[in-house]
Image (spheres, rainbow, N blue to C red):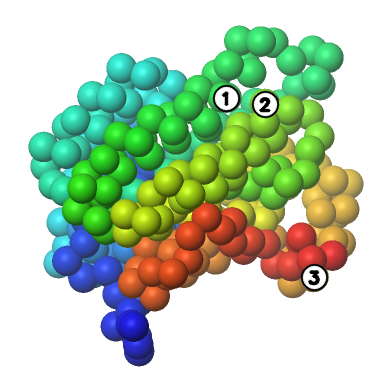
Amino acid sequence: MNAGLSAFDLVGSTAVVTGASRGIGEAIAVAFLRAGADVIALQRTPPSEALRAAARECHQNLEHVTVDFADEASVAAAIDETLRVADVDILVNNAGTQIRHDSLEFPLSDFDAVMSVNARSVFQLCTGFAAGMVSRRRGKIVNLASLLSFQGGFRVPAYAASKGAVAQLTKAFANEWAVHGVNVNAIVPGYLATEMNSALLDDEERSGQIMARIPAGRWGQPSDIAGAAVFLASPAADYVHGTALPVDGGWLGR
């Protein structure tokens, strides 16, 4: 049994965080560095200055692997390149995209684009990195689900479908890999003040409706998600499998 604060540290671990260039991904990567992990950022662009500064401050290694999550071959190449650098102990699938249209006007090409990034790449990354975790009989996978894993939302049918898939993949993988010492769980962020939600934040009426339902009385920040990610990636969560942990200011409880 793990006890005390040491159960929450990530010292000696190597973590892959997808989409760590900003927002939730950047906040999680910074928190991992501060918890003692080395981080490999899988994303299109180089790491942000904030992320590089955190690595310097914490004396941890920070690597970057370029990837296009919409492209199957690019994801496969990124997995191979990453595994040449290090054994991966922790995987956080954070990268995602969102496209808004009325459902009757939603192009199939846009539906496929969202599903390829938000669902197919998650499947590909989980299976690609879990093979080593299963053979070593240890590992943590944290997927980013959504409130729309459980609710339909408005004008985002592809996003809702993709995040429903993420929640179900989390359970399916946990059922197979828990016996091998690999924990697969998901975080369910509430409404966060991020670039992805800029359209909602700019819509006074809809933003007000959302705020009225959040018991905490505020929109969340990316930093609100980081602690949950550290927990699920740490030894403190060794007996947590297949769960979707809401970090939503109480939204789902209302």
Residue type, label 1: Val
**Residue 21 relative to residue 100: left or right:** left
Residues tagged 2 and 1 counted as in contact (Cβ below 8 A): yes
Closer to the chain start, of discs 3 and 2, is 2
Q: Residues within 10 Å of mark 3 (few under 14, many from 20)?
A: some
Q: Which one is nearer the viewer's eye here, 189 or 24?
A: 189
Comes first in the chain, label 2 or label 1: 1
- What is the distance, in whole Å, between disc 2 and disc 1 at their CAs? 6 Å
Residue beneath the point at 67% across and 26% down: 158
Q: Nearer the viewer, residue 143 or 208?
A: 143
Identify residue for label 3: 215
Name the foreground residue: 108 vs 135.
Answer: 135
Question: Mark 2 falls on what kind of element?
Answer: helix
Relative horizontal placement of residue 157, taking residue 81 as reference (left or right):
right
Q: Which numbered marker is on residue 158?
A: 2
Residue drawn at 32 percent across, 59 percent down: 181
Mark 1 vs mark 3: which is more N-terminal?
1
Q: How many marks?
A: 3
Residue in the foreground of this view, choosing between 226 and 90: 90
Tell me which residue sits at (52%, 55%) in the image: 242
Res. 252 image quadrant? bottom right
Relative to residue 152, is residue 54 depicted above or below?
Answer: below
Q: Give percent across and percent down for residue 108.
A: 66, 10
- Which three-letter amino acid code belongs to the residue tagged 2? Ala
